């Protein structure tokens, strides 16, 4: 082999090596970022939030700066509590579920049903209409408990001195119309006949007008916010997204590709939602699925203003953007600025005040029923 041939072979080998290395680099660069198999959370645990996000836990004093969450020991020694005679649920000081909603004249058309004599809860349940909706509106029946003198959903083994039936005036499907109201009258009269009662049904024209006014108010004060986090360069795997969100207190939701930030009160809706491509979450090998966007969402009317949900949303979005290498954008694809977020926060305070004045405070039972 001549010297020229030798040099050409060497050069060819070098070119081939460079091509292989470049291809390997491109492959690695395009591979979605993966979750750390042995994550170090700087003292935090999955499902625990940091700084402002730690408000959903039972302790508000142990967290450090947002980017350096501290460990909070939430363990409870039940044996020790038992020895102290404090094993009853009240001793744990845990949040309790909210009492079930009752019919309310603010958002329901209510028909009182006078009874000749008290009836058992079993009889009421047997006579109940088979449907819980008339058209697109929820239909409900309540009874006045003879013992507690409180209105409640009828229960077996109880007795009721009077009953009432109600149909919701408005929801996100629109206002109550004449056909739905007519169905309400028919269902209420049939129910009352089974129990020997006499219904006092409100006048249809007035209730339909009230429904339209309530729907107009609701449609102009319904707020659902979202922020999209878009990858700047390298895509993310579902596992990487879940790990980063888990550090801020998010947990897996019911649907694939969804996580939620739970409320501090059992039975309340989650404070925030986070969603990404469900098909990526269901893939046979999720680690190979590439995500370039995740969306944070807030149902403003469903969350108590004292939870400071928008502040939590903003803090979570900024932290995830920094950790995941992403940029925050709005629905139009424009980058969200600090000034824009401040304006949103100010607008929300006005909305909260308006809802409070209407006795439909954000996060209340009535607000969640109306804006659903």
Image (cartoon, grey):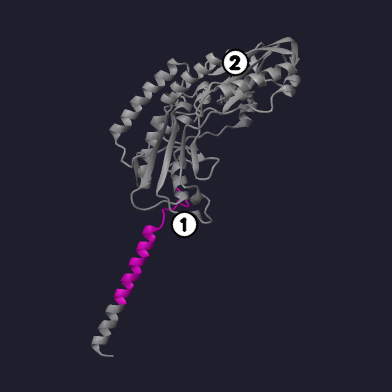
Most distant residue in the top direction:
116
Q: Tag count in the figure?
A: 2
Task: Left or right? Give the position of 195 relative to 371.
Answer: right
In the displayed structure, does residue 349 sit left or right of residue 110?
Answer: left
Taking the spot 31% from the left edge, 28% from the top edge, the residue there is 343
* Mark 2 neighbour class, 10 Å CA radius: few under 14, some 14 to 19, many 20 or more: many
- Label 2 sits on a secondary structure element that is strand
Residue that lies at the very extreme toward the bottom in this rendered image: 1
According to the picture, the residue beneath numbered tag 2 turns out to be 110
User: In which image quadrant can residue 338 be found?
Assistant: top left
Q: Is residue 318 left or right of residue 245?
A: left
Query: Percent from the top left, x then y, of residue 172?
Result: 50, 28
Q: Position of residue 44 (x, y in %)?
A: 45, 40
Q: Residue 194, labelled with which disc? A: none
Image vertical order of residue 147 relative to residue 339, above or below: above
Gap between marks 2 and 1, in whole Å? Answer: 55 Å
Q: Residue at x 26, y 86 (%)?
A: 5
Of the pair 271 and 204, the residue shown nearer to us? 204
23 is within the stretch colored magenta = yes
Query: Magenta segment range?
Result: 13-39
* Residue bearing the label numbered 1: 288
Instruction: Please say if the residues under marks 2 and 1 sit with CB atoms less than 8 Å apart.
Output: no
Asked whether residue 294 appears in the rendered view, the answer is yes
Q: Quadrant of the N terminus?
A: bottom left
Element class at badge 1: helix
* Residue 161 in view (yes/no): no
């Amino acid at each position: 082999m001549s010297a020229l041939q030798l040099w050409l072979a060497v050069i060819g080998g070098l070119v081939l090596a460079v091509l292989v290395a470049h291809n390997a680099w491109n492959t690695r660069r395009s591979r979605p970022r993966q979750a750390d198999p042995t994550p170090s959370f700087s003292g935090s645990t999955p499902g625990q939030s940091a700084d402002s996000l730690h408000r959903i836990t039972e302790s508000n004093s142990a967290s450090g700066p947002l980017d350096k969450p501290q460990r909070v020991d939430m363990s409870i020694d039940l044996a020790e509590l038992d020895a102290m005679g404090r094993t009853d649920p009240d001793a744990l000081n845990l949040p309790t579920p909210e009492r079930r909603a009752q019919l309310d004249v603010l958002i329901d058309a209510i028909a009182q049903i006078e009874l000749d004599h008290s009836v058992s809860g079993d009889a009421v349940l047997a006579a109940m209409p088979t449907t819980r909706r008339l058209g697109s509106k929820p239909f409900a029946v309540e009874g006045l408990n003879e013992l507690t003198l409180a209105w409640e959903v009828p229960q077996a083994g109880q007795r009721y001195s009077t009953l009432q039936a109600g149909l919701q005036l408005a929801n996100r499907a629109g206002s109550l119309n004449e056909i739905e109201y007519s169905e309400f009258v028919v269902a209420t009269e049939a129910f009352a006949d089974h129990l020997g009662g006499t219904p006092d049904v409100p006048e249809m024209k007035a209730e339909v007008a009230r429904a339209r006014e309530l729907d107009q108010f609701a449609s102009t004060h319904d707020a659902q916010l979202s922020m999209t986090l878009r990858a700047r360069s390298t895509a993310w795997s579902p596992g990487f997204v879940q790990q980063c969100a888990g550090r801020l207190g998010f947990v897996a939701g019911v649907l694939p590709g969804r996580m939620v930030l739970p409320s501090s009160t059992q039975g309340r809706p989650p404070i925030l939602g986070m969603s990404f491509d469900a098909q990526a979450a269901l893939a046979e090998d999720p680690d190979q699925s590439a995500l370039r966007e995740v969306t944070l969402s807030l149902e403003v009317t469903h969350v108590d203003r004292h939870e400071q949900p928008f502040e939590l949303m903003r803090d979570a979005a900024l932290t995830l953007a920094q950790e995941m290498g992403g940029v925050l954008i709005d629905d139009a694809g424009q980058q969200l600025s600090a000034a824009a977020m401040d304006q949103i926060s100010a607008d929300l305070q006005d909305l909260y005040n308006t809802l409070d004045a209407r006795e439909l405070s954000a996060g209340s039972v009535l607000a969640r029923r109306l804006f659903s």
